[in-house]
Amino acid sequence: MAKKLIKNGFTLIELLVVIAIIALLTTIAVVSLNNARQKSRDAGRISNVKQIQTALELYFADQNGYPVEALAVTLGVSPNDCFDEDGFVDICDAGGTTYMGTVPANPTPGGAAYSYTSTDGSTYSMTFTLEGATGGLAAGAHTATPSGIQ
């Protein structure tokens, strides 16, 4: 009587196919995660700019003008990380009006620092950069003014 060969385990081809499928699914997951992170940073940038614009409008209502900064200042980093009645400063006055206790900075990596200018206080220009198309805005540099975001 012949002995019957019992097959236990997987063949090399079966193992390689399973490993290839796992590698493909992992690659797709990593690419999707990185894309979601970029979109999250861009959404945060737009939110930050709108918050700064709101604070600037409150300042304008109280001071009858925007903070005058003839040379562009980088927002969210010292010495421009607080916003009170004196404009963008390093430390807000304890007794004065604080419009933003902490001015938000550009989320990294990617994008560019938020930059603010106003030569005469009647208008302002704030620049920022998006990594990808978000909220109807294309990737690249954009400008926020009292009339909105372009």
Image: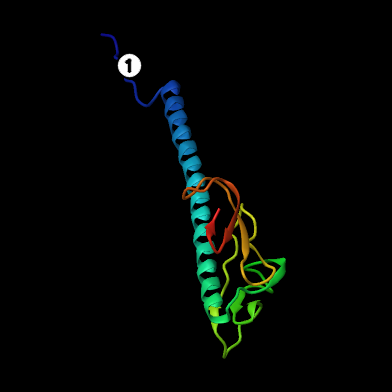
Report which quarter residue 49 is drawn in.
bottom right
Q: In this view, does 42 lie above or below 49?
A: above
Q: Is residue 134 above or below residue 76?
A: above
Tell me which amino acid carries mark 1.
Leu
**In the displayed structure, does residue 22 sit left or right of residue 93?**
left
What residue do we see at 61% from left, 73% from top?
66
The residue at the far top in this view is 1
Task: State the image coordinates of residue 114 (x, y, percent, origin top left).
Answer: 63, 61
Q: Can residue 95 be seen in this view?
A: yes
Task: State the image coordinates of residue 149 (x, y, percent, origin top left).
Answer: 54, 56
**In the displayed structure, does residue 117 sit left or right of residue 2?**
right
Q: Can residue 101 be seen in this view?
A: no
Quarter of the N terminus within the rendering: top left
What residue do we see at 29% from left, 14% from top?
4
The residue tagged 1 is: 5
The residue at the far right in this view is 71
Task: State the image coordinates of residue 39 (x, y, percent, origin top left).
Answer: 49, 50
The residue at the far bottom in this view is 95
What residue do we see at 49% from left, 55% from top?
43
